[in-house]
Structures are given as C-alpha cells and as structure tokens.
Image (tube, rainbow, N blue to C red):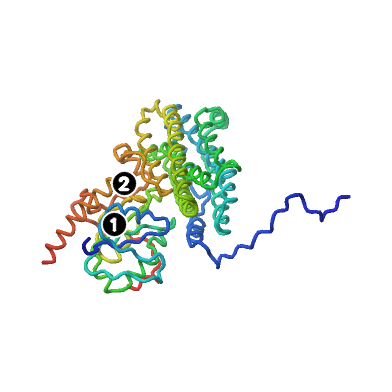
Amino acid sequence: MGQAKLIYYSSASGNTQRFVERLGLPALRLPVSAEGPMPTPLGPYVLVCPSYADGKGRGAVAKPVIAFLNDPTRRAGLRGVIASGNRNFGALFACAGDLLARKCNIPVLYRFELAGTDSDIDRVRAGLETFWRQECSIAT
Amino acid sequence: MKDLHTPGPVSRPVPRAVNWNRLQDDKDLEVWNRLTSNFWLPEKVPLSNDIQSWSQLTEDEQTLTIRVFTGLTLLDTIQNTVGAPALMADAATPHEEAVLSNIAFMEAVHARSYSSVFSTLCNTAEVDEAFRWSQENPHLQAKSRLILDEYDATGSPLKRKVASVFLESFLFYSGFYLPMHWSSRARLTNTADLIRLIIRDEAIHGYYIGYKFQRALEHVTEAERAEIKDFAFSLMFDLYDIEGRYTEQLYDGLGLTEDVKHFLHYNANKALQNLGYEALFPDEATRVNPAILAALSPGSDENHDFFSGSGSSYVIGKAVATEDEDWAF
C-alpha cells in the first residue's frame, strides 16, 4: 500500500475504525488518548473524524484530534475532513466536520452515519480519488 | 419479638462506594457527562403552541397520533422499569450502573412527556381509549413480549444488551416517524422538538449499550460470539416481522407504509451497527424520504459536502460552541 493520505480517530466503539477498514486505503490511526504517541503525516492528508457533541455542540471534536492538530506542522498537511455522526443528534449531526472546517479553513468533504453504508464507502473512495487528482494539479 | 439483627437467608453484599476518580472504562464518564448535560424535562418545550396545529389534523390523523404515542409510552415504560434495571445487574463497572440509572430515569421522563402532549392537545376520553388500544394491540404486545423474554432474569447478559439496543435503536422508529412526518409539513412542530430530544437520548442509550455489548463479547469464546450473532439477526428478523405488520396497521390509511418501512430498514441497520455488526438491509431499501431526514436533523444539510456533488462550492461550517482552551490555534 502507498503512503497514508488518511488519518482517523476512532473511539473504543470502533465505528470509524470499521469505516476506514472497509475503505481499504492506507490510513494512520490517532491514539485513543490525547497523551498517546501521535502519527507523523508524510504529506497532505484528509482527516476522518467522528462527532461527540453534547446538546449544545460542546465537546464535538475528540481530545486526541485537537492534540494532533494543535501542532502547526501536522496541521499544515490537513486538506479536508470527512465527518461522521448520527442524524439523531439533530442539527448537530456530524458537527465536528463543520467545526474543523471553520477552525482550519478546509472543506467538509463528506458526512456519514456511524460506521457508514456501502454507498458511503463507494462515494468516499471515488471522491477521494478525484480530490487528490485535483489537489495534485493545484500543487504543480 | 423478632431479632432484627438476624440476616435473611440470602444477604446481599454491601456494594463498593463508586469512585468516579478511578475509572475502569473512560466511556462511562464520557457518556455520563453527555447524558447529564443533555438533561431536560417536557416543561421546557412550549407544547401549547401546537394547539391550533392539532385542531387542523383530521380525526383519523389525531387518533393515529395518539395511538402512536401510547405505543412509544409503552416502550419507554418497559425500558424504565424493566430494561435498564435488568442491565444494571449485568454492569461491568460501578460507573456503568450509575449511567444505567440515568438511562432508566430519562426513560421515565420520556414516558411522562407523551402524557404532557396528551394533556395539552387531547381530551381525556380519547387518550384513555388509546391506552386501551395499546394494551390490546397484538403487534405492540408481541414486540414487547419478545423483548421482555430476553430481559428475564434467567436470560443471558449479552442477549439482554442485544434486546435493549434493538428497543432503543429500532423499535421506537415506527412511532418516531409520525411526528417527523408532521414536522416536515409544518404540523405539530413543538411536539416534534420534544420528540427530537427523546431521539437524541435514545441514540446515546443505543450507542452506549451497544458499546458495552462489544466489550462483553471480548470475554466469550468464538463459538459463543457466533451464537450471539445468530441470535441477534434472528431477533431482528422476528421484530422486523412484527414491526412490518404494526406499520401497515397504523399507516396504510395515510398511504405512508412504504415510506415508514424504508425508515425502519435504515434504523435496523443503525441498531446493528451499534452492536458492531454489518448492515442487514441493502442501501436501496434504506433510502429514507429526504423530508424525514431533514426533519430528523434540521439545518444539517444546508452545507453541501464536496463528494456528494450537490453544491457548486463547499461552505465552511457555521459557528458552534467550542472549548477554546483546548485549541492552541
């Protein structure tokens, strides 16, 4: 497999882990704890990030994701976010994506629920392929 | 006079005092914090603003709505008085027991909320009639029976969790569909706000109990794991069968049955995902009416995402509260 262009966080419930496994693309997992060892992205990457907000939107982004992005070198490679969540959280569905987009000035590429459906997997695979092609043509 | 100091035949051991500064499972505190910060009571929702909207529903639509809500009340009652307490006995940590006691209480709040809707919008005779209907409805009774049999004290802790997740994440949705349908047509919008609070709670309950199920599965043999998975899918089939008939009975009159069934498939798959399992229904069977999805998560689809190709450009998200002290930039 090539160089990992996906970085993801998955809590012990494992939904995001299962989504990334089904994508079948090289990916680096963030530690479950904010104090854990952080992976070093070797180039531009997309973040796959679940949402954990309370009813007011607080705490949407998991602490290890914040700890990872607080490093300017690691943050510099971030090109977009794929956010997951549950529509049952109403207007705050997948709100970690909106928050990261605003904080880091990057687009929300896609949103899915829990561990995703087969259609989600197809769309994200196709979407990432197009996205990286466009990114490369901008970069050169 | 009896000797008050003689212990009974089976003396319960004194439990250990729960110490929240010594966690065995971080998820317990995370979910406790979510649930307690989401606490609400029906008095928070101005249900009386729906009085006029209620009067614009036909008599059949009103009867259907009251019946659907008595059905939901029954499920909440079961979860409050039997389901969550049964899970407490199986808890792996003292903190899990505390979380389950919150879940049990919120189920009582949910059950109580439907009566707030009734007392605001309906007359007593209609409501009494609907509660009678729910007691006699064969489908409602059948699905309750299937769940209660698993909650039985002689059952297995893993099976109890499966039944509980199916109640929380699947069985409610034949009922939740209706207020979302009304909301999508600008009817009973305050009632829909209240239902969305219940839906949010049930999502956390299903997630947490499903998570505990996955942790518990780690301690059993491969053969037992296979047996539990067979059990879970077979219970889902049985419940789906009943839900199908319940849905037809309720919604055929409004011509909504097919629409509701898509919503059931979609939620059945989500319930299975909470347990860590793959989907049962294929994607084409789970395409929920977009108006219902929009009612479920209002406003969340305003921002186009890049891969769906639905917008010409992507929009950077709207402002939400953050814990700024955590972010260094």
* Residue A101 appears in view: no
Q: Badge 1: few (under 14), some or many (20 or more) residues near its Cα, within 10 Å?
A: many
Chain ID for label 2? A
Which marked residue is nearer to the observer: mark 2 or mark 1? 2
Query: Left or right: where does residue A23 sit relative to residue B121?
Result: left
Q: Is mark 2 on a helix, strand or loop?
A: loop
Question: x, y (%) of residue B131?
Answer: 56, 32
Mark number displayed over residue A82: 1
Q: Which residue lies furthest to the right in this view?
A: B1
Chain ID for label 1? A
Mark number displayed over residue A117: 2
Q: Nearer the viewer, residue B225 or B47?
A: B225
Same chain for labels 2 and 1? Say yes or no.
Answer: yes
Query: Left or right: where does residue B16 sit relative to residue B36?
Result: right
* Location of the C terminus of chain A (image quadrant): bottom left
Instruction: Inspect the image, locate mark 1, and give the three-letter code of the amino acid beneath it.
Output: Ile
Task: Identify whether B125 is placed above or below B275.
Answer: above
Q: What element carries label 1?
A: strand
* Residue A5 appears in view: yes
Query: Residue at the location (31% across, 73% down)?
Result: A71
Question: x, y (%) of residue B141?
Answer: 54, 31
Instruction: Inspect the image, locate mark 2, and give the three-letter code of the amino acid beneath it.
Output: Thr
Query: Left or right: where does residue A63 sit relative to residue A79?
Result: right
* CA distance separating discs 2 and 1: 14 Å
